[in-house]
């Protein structure tokens, strides 16, 4: 079975998005034939770039601050321009996740920015592919997967007065885990396809 690498490249301001990143990596790592690695992009050190270059898929994650990805994540995104110029991540898979204090918080705008980053690099975006949970139906609630109703990526909500030991909700973390597994499964399918074409 092909072995694929899923890299989770994230920034977390207060630890909430880091818990989401860990859940994404857990979901990817529990997929047979896949391994996952976590990369805090706050430090743009020499170990970061080779790890991302050798990954089959990169899942981007950032908190939503003022309706957009955090400045620290944006600094990472801008630092990828030399990779963009040489098309280094072209045809890798990509996905994204975000967290904010508000239930809405314009998280879609932040996920959209992550999608644009991936598109500029020529990457293939993997959406969440979960029906909306939460209050989409009258019997839904806080414990549902995809309770915030995202499609482009995994969303989480962490109340501003709760530490990372209490937020985000378990359902948001399970949603992130689902995203990690989905990305790993998609990467494996791509690798099977490449192997078949090579034969």
Image (cartoon, rainbow, N blue to C red):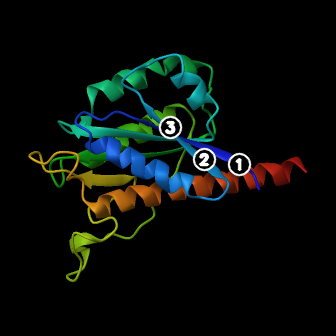
* Residue in view at x 24 percent, y 59 percent: 169
Residue 115: image location, x then y, percent: 43, 41
Q: Is residue 95 visible?
A: yes
Lower sequence index among marks 1 and 3: 1
Quadrant housing residue 30:
bottom right
The disc at residue 35 is: 2
Give the CA distance from mark 3 to mark 2: 24 Å
Side of 82 where 1 appears, left or right: right
Quadrant housing residue 93:
top right
Task: Say few, some or many: other residues with alpha carbon within 10 Å of mark 3 (under 14 / 14 to 19 / 20 or more).
Answer: some
Image quarter where the N terminus lies is: bottom right
Give SS at disc 1.
loop
Give SS at disc 2.
strand
Where does label 1 land, which residue?
3
Side of 172 where 197 appears, left or right: right
* Residue in view at x 87 percent, y 47 percent: 198
Lower sequence index among marks 2 and 1: 1
Give SS at disc 3.
helix
Residue 199: image location, x then y, percent: 91, 51
């Amino acid at each position: 079975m092909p072995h694929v690498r899923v890299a989770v490249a994230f920034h977390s301001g207060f630890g909430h998005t880091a818990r989401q990143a860990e859940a994404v990596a857990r979901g990817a790592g529990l997929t047979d034939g896949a391994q996952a690695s976590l990369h805090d992009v706050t430090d743009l050190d020499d170990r970061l770039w080779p790890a991302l270059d050798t990954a089959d898929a990169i899942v981007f994650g950032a908190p939503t601050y003022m309706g957009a990805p955090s400045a620290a994540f944006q600094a990472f995104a801008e630092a990828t321009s030399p990779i963009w110029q040489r098309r280094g991540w072209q045809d890798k898979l990509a996905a994204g996740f975000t967290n904010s204090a508000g239930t809405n918080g314009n998280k879609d705008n932040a996920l959209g920015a992550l999608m644009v980053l991936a598109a500029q690099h020529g990457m293939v975006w993997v959406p969440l592919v979960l029906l909306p949970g939460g209050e989409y139906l009258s019997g839904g609630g806080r414990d549902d997967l995809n309770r915030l109703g995202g499609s482009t990526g995994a969303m989480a909500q962490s109340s501003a007065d709760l530490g990372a030991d209490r937020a985000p909700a378990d359902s948001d973390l399970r949603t992130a885990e689902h995203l990690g597994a989905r990305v790993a499964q998609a990467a494996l399918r791509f690798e099977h396809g490449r192997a078949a074409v090579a034969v």
